[in-house]
């Protein structure tokens, strides 16, 4: 049963054929197979577009008609329809057809041109009906009413349903249509919906729209306008309406964007926001995002793609919320524009603004219209322009989040992001031609990177390149490659094609405090920033800074990612940085505060991670902003994980601004974290910077410290010559200054240089370090040296002395709460037990070491211990366990860029696989 109109019998075809002998079937127009096809099952997940045609026989139930007469009439109707469809070029068998007893209900797919239903089908149908009537006496003659509409329909388990179908049946039952057929000498009266007339009839080069009459249809719940014609007996010319009147009520959109690219997901999201059936209530969708992101293009593209859903027309207004004029459109001005677009007679428009608003709401009431409110400033501006009727769909674009609209009007928000690299390349290809883009792919990739996926920036670049067709794209890429001049290069010569100007409109709309925060964020080093760091940068109290950043977020000048972290688009950051460089902006002092915040927080975390490390003086805090509080090692590492890219960038900022003391100190505070996480290359980078800073400060102690830790980083990276050079110079500087701790550390690190290359020399260095550490009464560093001594003793095969040394070291670490030392030493003890053939004891040591490493987040040491654990499993024949451990060790080593270790572990895994193959039963049987 169809919802909202009389019951449809799915088994109507057998009813037609029941009781007919073959001759009667042929006489009725049925061959071996019925001409009526059941509604086809289709994907029920979404509505589909169909042309809706219904015909109904006038006076079918007339008492003068006998059953044979009705059978003859029905057969004549189907023969006439088949003949007319064939003459009009519409494939009958591709349509879904339902028998209606006294009529026929047809659904034609979207691929069938709608023009055929008015240009040729009605006259062909009238001709076929007259042919039938010429061979049948009066009770068997046919006169038809026919209705045409189109819309989205939904298939379900019982057939089809949609309000568009309801409307088509209401049109068929319209009294004006019945009256038109009754008063016509012809055999067919056609009624088309307002949408069908506006979109199909009026634009047809063949069909004469002036032969149609407008009619008011009031049937049940329907109260609409439609258009009637008499195909085989047209209305006289002197009664034809003026064509201009038909176009007046249907305003149109601006042109479709020609270079629109991508946004497939976003277009689908807008469509999903609409109800499933085309005649249901509309929706309010707010498309939001930063300036230049392509909000207007998306709105217009979707509007043009879906224009047929809105037979009442489309209204558009640029509200100039962010515009060079600086003056947003007031709602009364926008409403007056709407009334003019609706072609209302000037005399009918009142002077009072509220009366105009009421007239606007009345004019769009119950019309399926699309209203595009482009470039809105805020929710207040938009709310006054929303129609009162739920039949309208509203698309809004804005740089602001429009939270008020989402809250009070149940609007749906769609936030636009930048184009991805393939979409950006496609946009350039559309503007420049695929050949030019393919010719210089390297330059195009650079242009895509520099424009950072922003459609406005890509459009400016494409316009410039198109204007100067002989200009190599590589030259344009080189111009954009200089970050300080990038915004100058992204100037198309007009305000609407000037990226700096487009961003300025968002900036000028900010409150004073929010603008201050925005400027300073342009100075912040690193890819993102947290709220505590923003408070330090800006000098604004933490409670207030949250509200100000929220303003920037609502304006899409910053993006939130994670719980309380924010980032800027690259081009917005450049613009903010320009503003921060202006006189009296306070940019440099603010940056110094932020670098100081990073330094003092990382120093606090480093001291908690390594309380036994010799401390440094980092001076007074430059900001009163509170530092994060750390509860344990995990919370410290979580902070470092989130901020370590910013800490590295802060060190580079310290170099650029001539703060060598901060550059050196940041290397020191990062050292323990980078070591624990295995970031070897970053260790090298930070200590190279620190060494340059120490030389600038002309401080031998700082230089010796930097050379020693740079040498350690080189040693861990397997670069022995560089490591040895720096460590020997550090050793000399420590001796000159009487720094016994520095001297001992240099010996300790020199033992790393010769690890597994000259284990005897490495042991000598470790023992020298041990002797010096014992003179300093530093039990933790004594334990470090003892553990190193035990390791090299084990490598040299002296497992008894090695075990003693490592056990003494472990006791010291346990006594003084140094868990990292315990983890490393347990790994050494496991290695010793393995080589003494006590594999089960080795497994216990390795597992305890692994547990400590994982609790500490010490992934560098975890990789070593997993390698050793795998070897013990392999020795025990536990191949699956060995493989698991080596695979994990391989992943960690790759992440830490330990190439030598990666290659070794891969060889071990290959050897393990070979061993597994040889020990399989089938391999043994073959060998025997």
Image: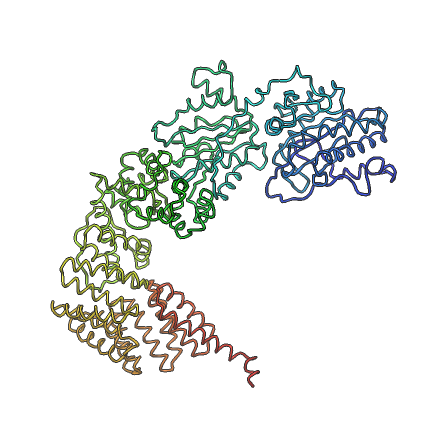
Location of the C terminus by quadrant is bottom right
Q: Quadrant of residue 756?
A: bottom left
Is residue 607 visible in this depiction of the protein?
no
Location of the N terminus by quadrant is top right
Q: Residue at x 69, y 43 (%)?
A: 40
Seen from the viewer's position, the closer of residues 788 and 375 is 375
Seen from the viewer's position, the closer of residues 133 and 523 is 133
Is residue 481 positioned above or below 682 on the image? above
Q: Is residue 751 left or right of residue 86?
A: left
Considering every residue shown, the one lying at the far front of the view is 470
Seen from the viewer's position, the closer of residues 600 and 367 is 367
Q: Is residue 168 left or right of residue 886?
A: right
Q: Position of residue 146 (x, y in %)?
A: 71, 28
Q: Position of residue 289 (x, y in %)?
A: 40, 39
Give the colour scheme of this rendering. Answer: rainbow
Is residue 444 visible in this depiction of the protein?
yes
Considering every residue shown, the one lying at the far top of the view is 347
Q: Is residue 356 left or right of residue 152?
A: left
Q: Quadrant of residue 85?
A: top right
Q: Residue at x 55, y 30 (%)?
A: 310
Q: Position of residue 653 (x, y in %)?
A: 24, 51
The mark tally for this picture is 0
Is residue 823 positioned above or below 499 on the image? below
Is residue 728 positioned above or below 797 on the image? above
Is residue 458 positioned above or below 237 on the image? below
């Amino acid at each position: 049963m169809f919802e909202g109109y009389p019951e449809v019998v799915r088994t109507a075809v057998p009813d037609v054929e029941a009781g007919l002998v073959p001759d009667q079937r042929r006489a009725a127009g049925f061959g071996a197979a019925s001409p009526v096809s059941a509604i086809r099952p289709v994907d029920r997940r979404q509505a589909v577009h169909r042309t809706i045609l219904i015909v109904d026989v006038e006076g079918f139930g007339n008492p003068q008609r006998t059953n044979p007469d009705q059978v003859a009439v029905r057969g004549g109707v189907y023969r006439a329809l088949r003949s007319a469809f064939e003459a009009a070029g519409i494939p009958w068998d591709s349509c879904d057809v339902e028998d209606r007893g006294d009529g026929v209900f047809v659904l034609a797919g979207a691929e069938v041109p709608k023009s055929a239903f008015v240009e040729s089908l009605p006259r062909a149908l009238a001709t076929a009906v007259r042919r039938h009537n010429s061979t049948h006496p009066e009770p068997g003659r046919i006169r038809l009413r026919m209705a045409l509409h189109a819309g989205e329909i939904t298939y379900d388990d019982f057939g089809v349903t949609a309000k568009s179908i309801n409307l088509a049946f209401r049109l068929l039952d319209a009294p004006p249509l019945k009256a038109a057929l009754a008063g016509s000498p012809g055999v067919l009266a056609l009624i088309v919906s307002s949408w069908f007339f506006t979109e199909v009839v009026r634009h047809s080069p063949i069909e004469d729209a002036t032969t149609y009459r407008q009619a008011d249809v009031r049937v049940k719940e329907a109260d609409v306008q439609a258009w009637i014609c008499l195909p085989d007996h047209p209305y006289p010319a002197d009664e034809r309406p003026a064509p201009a009147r038909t176009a007046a009520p249907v305003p149109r959109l601006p042109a479709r964007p020609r270079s629109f690219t991508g946004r497939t997901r976003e277009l689908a999201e807008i469509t999903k926001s609409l109800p499933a059936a085309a005649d249901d209530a509309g929706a309010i969708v707010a498309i939001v995002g930063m300036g230049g992101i392509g909000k207007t293009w998306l709105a217009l593209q979707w509007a043009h793609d879906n224009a047929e859903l809105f037979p009442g027309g489309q209204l558009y207004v640029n509200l100039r919320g962010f515009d060079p004029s600086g003056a947003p459109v007031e709602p009364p001005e926008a409403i007056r524009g709407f009334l003019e677009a609706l072609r209302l007679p000037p005399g009918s428009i009142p002077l009072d603004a509220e009366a105009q608003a009421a007239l606007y709401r009345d004019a769009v009431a119950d019309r399926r219209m699309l209203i595009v409110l482009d470039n809105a400033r805020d929710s207040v501006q938009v709310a006054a322009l929303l129609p009162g009727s739920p039949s309208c769909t509203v698309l809004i674009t804005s740089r602001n989040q429009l939270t008020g609209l989402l809250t009070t009007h149940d609007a749906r928000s769609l936030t636009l992001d930048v184009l991805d690299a393939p979409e950006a390349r496609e946009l350039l290809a559309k503007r420049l031609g695929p050949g030019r883009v393919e010719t210089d792919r390297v330059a195009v990739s650079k242009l895509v990177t520099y424009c950072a996926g922003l459609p406005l920036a890509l459009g400016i670049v494409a316009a410039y390149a198109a204007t100067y067709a002989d200009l190599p794209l590589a030259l344009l890429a080189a111009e954009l490659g200089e970050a300080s001049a990038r915004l100058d290069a992204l100037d198309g010569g007009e305000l609407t094609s000037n990226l700096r100007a487009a961003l300025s409109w968002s900036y000028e709309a900010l409150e004073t405090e929010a603008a201050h925060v925005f400027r300073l964020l342009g100075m912040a080093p690193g890819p993102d920033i947290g709220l505590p760091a923003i408070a330090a940068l800006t000098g604004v109290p933490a409670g207030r800074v949250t509200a100000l950043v929220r303003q920037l977020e609502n304006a899409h000048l910053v993006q939130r990612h994670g719980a309380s972290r924010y980032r800027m688009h690259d081009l917005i950051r450049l613009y903010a940085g320009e503003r921060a460089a202006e006189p009296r902006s306070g940019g440099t002092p603010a940056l110094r505060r932020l670098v100081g915040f990073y330094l003092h927080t990382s120093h606090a975390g480093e001291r908690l991670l390594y309380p036994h490390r010799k401390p440094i003086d980092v001076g007074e805090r430059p900001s009163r902003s509170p530092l994060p509080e750390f509860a344990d090692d995990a919370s410290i590492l979580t902070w470092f994980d989130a901020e370590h890219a910013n800490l590295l960038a802060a060190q580079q900022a310290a170099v650029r601004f001539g703060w060598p003391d901060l550059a050196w100190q940041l290397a020191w505070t990062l050292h323990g974290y980078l070591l624990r996480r295995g970031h070897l290359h970053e260790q090298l980078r930070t200590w190279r910077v620190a060494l340059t800073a120490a030389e600038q400060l002309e401080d031998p102690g700082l230089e010796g410290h930097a050379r020693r830790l740079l040498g350690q980083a080189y040693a861990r990276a397997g670069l022995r010559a560089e490591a040895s050079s720096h460590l020997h110079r550090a050793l000399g500087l420590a001796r000159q200054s009487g720094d016994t701790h520095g001297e001992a550390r240099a010996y300790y690190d020199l033992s790393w240089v010769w690890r597994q290359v000259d284990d005897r020399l490495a042991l000598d260095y470790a023992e020298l370090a041990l002797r010096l550490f014992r003179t300093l009464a530093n039990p933790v560093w004594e334990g470090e040296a003892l553990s190193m001594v035990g390791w090299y003793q084990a490598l040299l095969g002296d497992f008894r002395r090695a075990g003693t040394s490592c056990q003494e070291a472990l006791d010291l670490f346990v006594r003084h709460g140094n868990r990292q030392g315990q983890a490393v030493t347990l790994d050494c003890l496991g290695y010793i037990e393995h080589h003494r053939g006590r594999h089960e004891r080795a497994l216990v040591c390795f597992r305890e070491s692994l547990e400590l490493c994982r609790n500490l987040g010490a992934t560098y040491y975890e990789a070593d211990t997993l390698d050793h654990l795998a070897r013990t499993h392999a020795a025990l024949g536990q191949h699956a366990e060995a493989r698991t451990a080596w695979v994990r060790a391989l992943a960690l080593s790759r992440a830490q860029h330990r190439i030598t270790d990666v290659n070794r572990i891969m060889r071990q895994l290959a050897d393990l696989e070979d061993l597994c193959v040889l020990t399989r039963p089938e391999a043994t049987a073959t060998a025997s």
